[in-house]
Structures are given as structure tokens and as C-alpha cells.
Amino acid sequence: MTATAPAAAPARARSHLANDAWEATMAAHATLMRRFAAEDLWSDVSMREYDVLYTLSKCDEPQRLSELGRHVLLSQPALSRLVDRLVERGLVARCADPSDARAAHLTLTPTGRDLQRRIGRRHGASVARAMTAALTEEELTLLESLTHKLSQEHRS
Amino acid sequence: MTATAPAAAPARARSHLANDAWEATMAAHATLMRRFAAEDLWSDVSMREYDVLYTLSKCDEPQRLSELGRHVLLSQPALSRLVDRLVERGLVARCADPSDARAAHLTLTPTGRDLQRRIGRRHGASVARAMTAALTEEELTLLESLTHKLSQEHRS
DNA sequence: GTTAGTTACATGCAAATGCATATAATCGGC
DNA sequence: GCCGATTATATGCATTTGCATGTAACTAAC
């Protein structure tokens, strides 16, 4: 509802705009992911594995597998086995939940935390370079706010 | 450079903002991808296959495999075989390029075009629903503009 | 025109993924 | 406390993916 547009914009225009915005968002995601993947950083852990290490590094509480699943775009079995591999490699530890024997609580091991920090420093710098090269601070703030709204769950 | 912030913001704050914006963007991408994947639309083609059909539907000219690769987040061999499957299923056709015998030009077959349109209608509506539920028209325009800037290639 | 280098795409093979399903634990009536 | 329903995670198996490499075609320098 801008001042220059009629209050009741045709639903088709609105829908088209929404699709264009989503397409541009996907394109940006793909472009940047490719750029980050091209950095010489992923010999020890893949980007997906790093994603898990990073997610675990953010929370002091041990995380459930299903909780991790909300942050990682991967099926539950795939995540389960990705974690298996991280545990085998000594980067992540499974510990039992006393109140729920089904749950497998996950934490970073000291080794895992070190590795996450080491890669995170370099990757973070790379992300900052790419983002600040394209957008001003104001724009970054705006982008964060808009995308944050998008990831809010909602009824339908 | 807002009125309230010093002109020379510390590099760390700037970098942190950039990383937050990227993280929010990835989270939005993951949330929406999951929501779209959950729609009952992907029995005939997977989302990745649809992505290829959609990309082909947008250009009248036959596309090269490598050109497709720029739009799809997939390795070259994986894309090559994904296209193989679409060709086998009669949705995509390979035609030779007279000026370059290496290139495999790709087009939608009539069947492929029909399928893309049929799924595209429903998926597009779903995308519109999710996006307009979260953002106003102004915000959608803004998001498109910001993410468009992000996908511009740039030197480093 | 030959040859080295590059580009476009394909293929062998091991690893990762998703789907369906299994297993095990918790929850909610009764 | 018992039993069906649900939740949390794991596993079997076919498919898909990526990495390394192969093959064929184009390009450019000589």
C-alpha cells in the first residue's frame, strides 16, 4: 500500500512480486553458497558438517538431534548419520538425557570446538567480505530484518 | 553510516552484522524450502528437477548445461545426470549446437513444458502465500532489490 | 597443420542422501 | 499399571551426489 499504488493492488501483481522476491532470494543463496564453497576451507569438514558444528557452538546446552534438524536443511536420517560421522571423528559427543532416554543430546568436544573456531574465523571473514561488498550497513540491517520475518513459522 | 553511529564503525561490528544478515538469510531459505518441500507437489518431479524445468521454461533459446549450472546449486556431473533422467523421461530434449559440437543444448519438450506449468501454478501460489503472509509489498520489493545485489558477481 | 592448453560434457566409483520402516521410550486415557 | 498413540532416533536399501578423471571439441601460438 504505497502512496502511488492503488490500495487494492491486483492479486496477480502481488503474487508475481512475491515470486520474484523468492527467486532473487534463492539466486542470492546459490551464488553465495557457491562462492563460500569455493574457498579453500572445507578439507577437514564439509559445509554441512560445519553447519552442525556451528549450530552446536552457539548453544551452551546440549542439543537434541531434532533441534539441530530445525537449523539444518537435511532429512532426519541424513542428519543422524552426519552426526555419527562427527562423533566417530571425535568432534561431537553424544550424552544421554536423564529425563528422556530416547533423546541423544549432542555437544561439541574440545577438539570439535577448536575446529569450529578455526574454520569459523576464516569463514566468517569470507562471509563478511562478500556481504559488505554488496550491501551497506543499513541494507544489511534491513536484509536481516526481512529474512528474519520470513523464517517465523506461521499458521496457514 | 546512520546518524547515530560513528562514521567509522568498528570493523568487527560491521563484520558481525554481515554475518548475522547471512545467517538470517540462510535460516529463511531453509525454513521456506522445508515448507515448500512439504507441499504435496513433488510426486512427479523433485524440487531440484523442477528447478531445472523452470529455468528452461524461462528462456526461449535452448540452454547449455553449463548455463543451467549457474542457476542450480549442483555439481556439473550431478546436473548432467539429472538432465539425463529428465531426457529419459521425455521432459527435456538435447539438441546439437551446429557451432559447437561439444555443447548439448537443452529444451523443454511439450510434455515437459506442460508439467512445468502445471506444477508451477501450484508452487507459485504456495510461494506467494508464504511470502505475502510474512512481508508487505514494499518489503517484498526491498527484499528483491537487496538479494539481487547479493547475487551480482564481483571481483575480490 | 601440429600441438599444447582450455572448455564442455560424461563416466567410474565411493560416499551421502532420502524414503520407508524399525526400535525404543514417553504420554494419555482408562 | 496397561495399552494404543506419539515422539525421538536408527537402519536397510535404492537413488543421488561429488570428486577425480576421461573424452571429445575448440582455440591459439607457432
Image: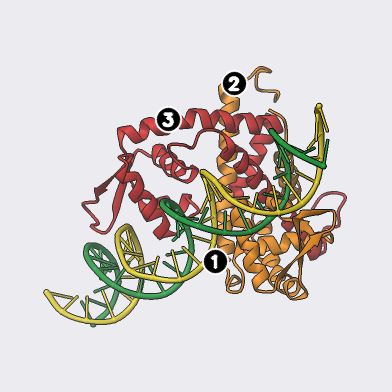
Chain colours: A red, B orange, C green, D yellow
The residue indicated by pointer 3 is A117
* Residue A117 percent location from the top left of the image: 42, 30
Label annotation for residue B38:
1
Label annotation for residue B11:
2
Mark sitting earlier along the chain (2/1): 2
Element under disc 1: helix
Contact (Cβ within 8 Å) of mark 2 with mark 1: no
Element under disc 2: helix
Marks 3 and 2 belong to one chain: no
Task: Tell me: A24 left or right of A82.
Answer: right
Q: Residue at the location (55% across, 41% down)? A: B23
When the figure is inspected, residue B44 is found, relative to residue A127, above or below; the finding is below
Q: Chain of mark 3?
A: A
* Residue A68 percent location from the top left of the image: 41, 50
* Residue A51 percent location from the top left of the image: 47, 43
Q: Can residue B148 be seen at all in this image of the molecule?
A: yes
When the figure is inspected, residue B27 is found, relative to residue B87, above or below; the finding is above
Inter-mark Cα distance, 3 to 1: 34 Å
Amino acid, disc 3? Arg
Q: Chain of mark 2?
A: B
**Residue placed most toward the observer, A57 or D7:** A57
Element under disc 3: helix
Q: Residue at the location (49% across, 28% down)? A: A121
Marks 2 and 1 belong to one chain: yes
When the figure is inspected, residue A86 is found, relative to residue A132, above or below; the finding is below
Q: Quadrant of residue D4?
A: bottom left
